[in-house]
Image (cartoon, rainbow, N blue to C red):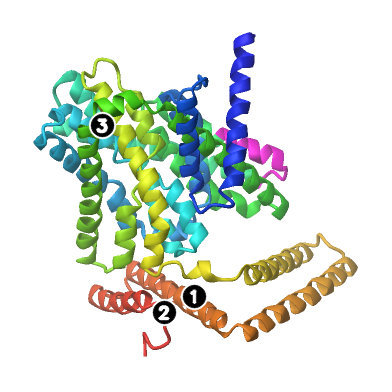
Amino acid sequence: MEAFFELEFEIVQVLAVVLLVALAVRRIRLPYTVALVVAGLALAFRGGMHLELTPGLVLGLFVPPLIFEAAFHLQLKDLKADLTPIVAMAVPGVLISTGLIAAVLVIAGVLPLPAALIFGALISATDPVAVVATFRSVGAPKRLMTLVEGESLFNDGTAVVIFHIMLALALEGTLNPIEGLFDFLRVSVGGLLIGGVFGYAVAKLIEQIDDYLIEVTLTTILAYGSYILAEHFHFSGVLAVVVAGLVNGNIGPRGMTPSTKMVLFTVWEYIAFLANSFIFILLGISVEWEQLRAYLVPSLIAVAAVLAGRFIVVYLLAGVIRLFRKTLPAPFLLVMSWGGLRGAISVALALSLPPAIADRPQLLAMTFAVVLFTLLVQAISISGLLSWLGLTQGAQQPTEYERIQGQLLAIRSAITYLDRLYSQGALIPTAYTTVKAELTAREERVSSQIEELLEDQPDLRAQIVSLARLEALRAERTALDELSREGILGEEALIELQAELDEAIYQGGSSESRT
């Protein structure tokens, strides 16, 4: 019982640190996850905390809700628009990255080939948490966020599968390429199928229920259940959670009332906040400084290899994709290259290495070095890179405009919901006309406030028009893809029209860009 109270006290301590860090980052320009790692490093120097980051804790407890929450909010229409580059980065990209990193380490004499391949696989899983948080704070393009998040969701699963194949190679000493490919397909497809079936079944069940407590419980069972079920059958639990979240997030909320959606999204936002907080603060606590000092040179070479591998993979695959469709603007490529952070998945895989791996201490030190570099250097500098590339346009909107715009959108959503209730016979005419008149009056009042604000700030008006033009251009581009898939538009015309739209988007959607 005493041990339980000690554990409970340490958890409360971590939560207190999380609270203090969350309050502090509201005043300083530092990504929240980076601040948590720094706090964890400080706690590690102070000593006294016995909580440890273990592979079971990360992969079994923290990763499922994190991945599910991210996939749940990712719209399939956004994902489909850039599915080709996302899949290319998440599957061939991980394979190429593993090979490149391993080759550098072997040539440099840092590791033998089996251990180098293990490191290449475990370090190829990107973690977008810190980057996406920065994207949101500076108003980066939505498409860029979808590319980074989508790639990370799928390459986590790919990296885990390849890691286990490379681990078997190191332990058994042999690898049949055909057998390895078959295992990769079996584990990946099995996870995708379990996630898809489980996610669809829960989504259909949610459609029949109107109780937010039950619906939150169902999605919690889905997040953990899909992972456990897939792992039980030796499939990819990570990929199962990704697909379960995508399917459920795009089907389940359709039948929910606004209040249920609000509760569900808030609960999952809090769960993801807790999971992220614990992972990153425990990551800082778990750093072994003695190992880092002992393997300093190999760790620096590993950092360079990972950086070089990321840039090569992004630009190589983007070049191949552009031979067929010019889809990725040059500034996006630079951000995706520099923003390929490593985090909890890589650390969990490194910690899961069995003692039989002779180079285990060195692999752990190199993993921590790469993760710390990406979080403490790349994550902090990503906002400056976005600003330098001119990708922070949305962040320049005044808070007052955002507040009024949010109010207007909320009122219009309420009007739409009220109209649906009335058409379904759920409201009597008196109630409908009274509340509709009140909402309409509020809508007109808020709309006039926006017009007054834009008249006072011509630069803001021009910026908003430019953003609207960009969204329209992106919608045109999505329509071209649909026309191509339906066979209405030929390949030659498609490439020409896409190139024209990409150029207009790259120029920021100015009115002269398509005249």
> Looking at the image, which residue is at 36% across and 69% down?
481
Could one spot residue 104 in this view of the protein? yes
Question: Which amino acid is tagged 3?
Answer: Asp
Vertical order, 48 against 478 (above or below): above
Give the structural element (helix, strand or loop) at label 3.
Answer: helix
Extreme residue in the bottom direction: 515
Main SS of the magenta segment? helix
Whether the magenta-drawn stretch holds residue 500 is answered as no
Mark 2 lies on residue: 509
Number of the label disc, if any, that sits on residue 183: 3
**Of the residues tagged 3 and 1, which is closer to the observer?**
1
Q: In which quarter of the image is the N terminus?
A: top right
Q: Which of marks 2 and 1 is nearer the N terminus?
A: 1
Chain part drawn in magenta:
207-221
Q: Residues within 10 Å of mark 1 (few under 14, many from 20)?
A: some
> Looking at the image, which residue is at 57% across and 30% down?
14
Give the structural element (helix, strand or loop) at label 1.
Answer: helix
Mark 1 lies on residue: 467
Q: Which of marks 2 and 3 is nearer the N terminus?
A: 3
Give the side of residue 216 with respect to residue 163, left or right. right
Give the side of residue 120 with respect to residue 125, left or right. left
- Where's residue 102, x and y in %? 17, 37
Question: Which amino acid is tagged 1?
Answer: Leu
| Circles 3 and 1: CB atoms closer than 8 Å | no
Q: Nearer the viewer, residue 311 or 20?
A: 20
Number of the label disc, if any, that sits on residue 339: none
Could one spot residue 197 in this view of the protein? no
